[in-house]
Image (cartoon, rainbow, N blue to C red):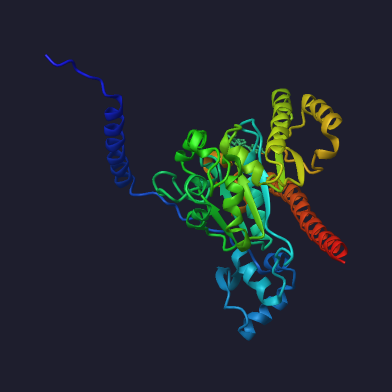
């Protein structure tokens, strides 16, 4: 009698095949999934404020045909004009107030990173990317976290709506330029997304294989995102990266690709302690990849800050240790954001607050404050880049003469 042989490999292959069929049936049963997202609408005064002109100016441009006729809604006996952030960008283009990076500067990469989970990396990277897009900057948001929470916030159900090639994977393991085909347009006309899927978890294992260590075209594993982003950076002003709560290959790639690192910390004892380990690892990454790492600034962003005495004491401790690294604006603990991750929604996109109007306004005020400070750091980075370039050119000329 033949012994029955347990063939693990065959079992895995069959299970994967059956799983794919199950996935298809699930899809059909769910009636598919992509939920189209929309932007909130607001009145002409707000549109004018965001665009940097007067409401009358917008009306005149519309009358002259320089802007398309506005959408309207009935408000009692009158038709009220309504606008979205996309319309505001169109207005800015017509009045010559479109924001963009200086010609001589390159796209800034802002990476939200921390070893620790649940510190608001996703929440803050999503809201910063949307804030930058709202201000009119051409923004790319990269979801480098296999959990794909950011991706979900744009209506995609990863692994159901998205297939091979529609995430970072191929750009990291096959060819840097494949990143281009992973870019998706979103409902914000100045915000593109590179989605994530669970398959990204495989990056760690794949990049630790010996043959990957010195790949002739792709380069060493930690610098592949950096090189991939270089191939599309021309199209953007700001690139924002959301990272997983670990220091695997995806996080290390994000750090090596960063110009600015924003490190969200919740001022609780355990979260503070993990920062020490994080800084030690960052130093090692810098030492190993000195040529490629170009981090100009690291800022600590205090998140989910409550008013308890314990939190205040912890903040005093953090201030003592990291003082100048800490952003002056903090993100307070707010009910408006408490459910935002599970509801997969950004509060820049909602019309109606889920709680009171006051709570909503306070949350928006805090977000705007934090995001404006990060944007200021981005502008400073551009200035610094131009200055460095000019200094090098002068130095080059004086050496040549
Ligand atoms: N300021 C805030 N106030 C209240 N809740 C918040 C705030 N910021 C984030 N949250 C909530 O905290 C939870 C974790 O946030 P988020 O997913 O952004 O963290 P993360 O660091 O990306 O987590 P992970 O490490 O798992 O990726 C979410 O439920 C989110 O809605
Ligand atoms: Mg996250």
Judge from the rendering whether residue 303 lies leftward or rightward of residue 75; answer left or right.
right
Using the image as rendered, state which of residue 46 and residue 261 is in the foreground. Answer: 261
Question: Where, by quadrant of the figure, is residue 387 drawn?
Answer: bottom right
Q: Is residue 345 above or below residue 136?
A: above
Quadrant location of the C terminus in the rendered image: bottom right
Judge from the rendering whether residue 176 lies leftward or rightward of residue 262; answer left or right.
left
Question: Where, by quadrant of the figure, is residue 53 drawn?
Answer: bottom right
Q: Position of residue 283 (x, y in %)?
A: 73, 34
Using the image as rendered, state which of residue 169 and residue 120 is in the foreground. Answer: 169
Point out the residue furthest to the front here: 401
Query: What residue is rendered at 57% in x and 78% in y?
Result: 69
Q: Position of residue 165 (x, y in %)?
A: 44, 50
Q: Position of residue 237 (x, y in %)?
A: 67, 60
Would residue 240 be seen by someone viewing this image from the given angle? Answer: yes
Point out the residue furthest to the bottom here: 64
Judge from the rendering whether residue 73 lies leftward or rightward of residue 328; answer left or right.
left
Q: Is residue 114 above or below residue 348?
A: above
Would residue 336 be seen by someone viewing this image from the given angle? Answer: no
Q: How many marks?
A: 0
Q: Position of residue 27 (x, y in %)?
A: 33, 45
Quadrant location of the N terminus in the rendered image: top left
Query: What residue is rendered at 77% in x and 45% in y?
Result: 297
Q: Is residue 386 above or below residue 354?
A: below
Point out the residue furthest to the left here: 1
């Amino acid at each position: 009698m033949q012994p029955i042989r347990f063939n693990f490999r065959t079992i895995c292959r069959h299970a994967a095949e059956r799983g794919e069929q199950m996935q298809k049936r699930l899809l059909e049963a769910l009636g598919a999934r992509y939920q189209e997202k929309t932007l909130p609408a607001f009145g002409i005064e707000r549109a004018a404020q965001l665009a940097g002109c007067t409401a009358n100016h917008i009306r005149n441009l519309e009358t002259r045909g320089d802007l398309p006729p506005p959408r309207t809604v009935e408000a009692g006996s009158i038709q009220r004009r309504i606008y979205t952030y996309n319309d505001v960008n169109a207005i800015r283009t017509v009045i010559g107030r479109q924001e963009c990076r200086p010609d001589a500067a390159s796209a800034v990469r802002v990476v939200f990173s921390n070893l620790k989970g649940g510190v608001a990396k996703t929440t803050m990277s999503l809201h910063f990317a949307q804030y930058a897009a709202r201000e009119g900057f051409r923004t790319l948001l990269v979801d480098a976290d296999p959990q794909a929470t950011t991706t979900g916030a744009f209506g995609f159900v990863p692994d159901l709506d998205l297939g091979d090639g529609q995430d970072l994977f191929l750009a990291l393991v096959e060819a840097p330029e494949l990143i281009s085909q992973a870019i998706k347009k979103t409902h914000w006309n100045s915000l593109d997304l590179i989605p994530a899927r669970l398959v990204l978890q495989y990056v760690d294992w794949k990049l630790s294989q010996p043959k990957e260590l010195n790949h002739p075209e792709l380069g060493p594993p930690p610098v592949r995102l950096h090189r991939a982003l270089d191939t599309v950076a021309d199209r953007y002003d700001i690139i924002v990266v959301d990272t997983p709560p670990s220091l695997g290959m995806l996080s290390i790639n994000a750090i090596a690709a960063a110009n600015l690192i924003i490190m969200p910390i919740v001022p609780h004892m355990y979260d503070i302690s993990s920062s020490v380990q994080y800084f030690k690892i960052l130093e090692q990454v810098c030492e190993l990849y000195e040529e490629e790492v170009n981090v100009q600034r690291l800022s600590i962003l205090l998140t989910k800050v409550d008013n308890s005495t314990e939190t205040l004491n912890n903040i005093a401790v953090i201030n003592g240790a990291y003082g100048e690294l800490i952003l002056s604006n903090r993100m307070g603990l707010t009910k408006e954001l408490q459910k935002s991750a599970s509801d997969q929604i950004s509060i820049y996109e909602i019309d109606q607050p889920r709680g009171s109007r006051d709570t909503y306004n306070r949350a928006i005020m805090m977000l705007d404050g934090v995001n404006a400070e990060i944007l200021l750091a981005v502008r400073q980075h551009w200035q610094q880049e131009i200055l460095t370039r000019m200094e090098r050119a002068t130095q080059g000329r004086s050496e040549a003469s």
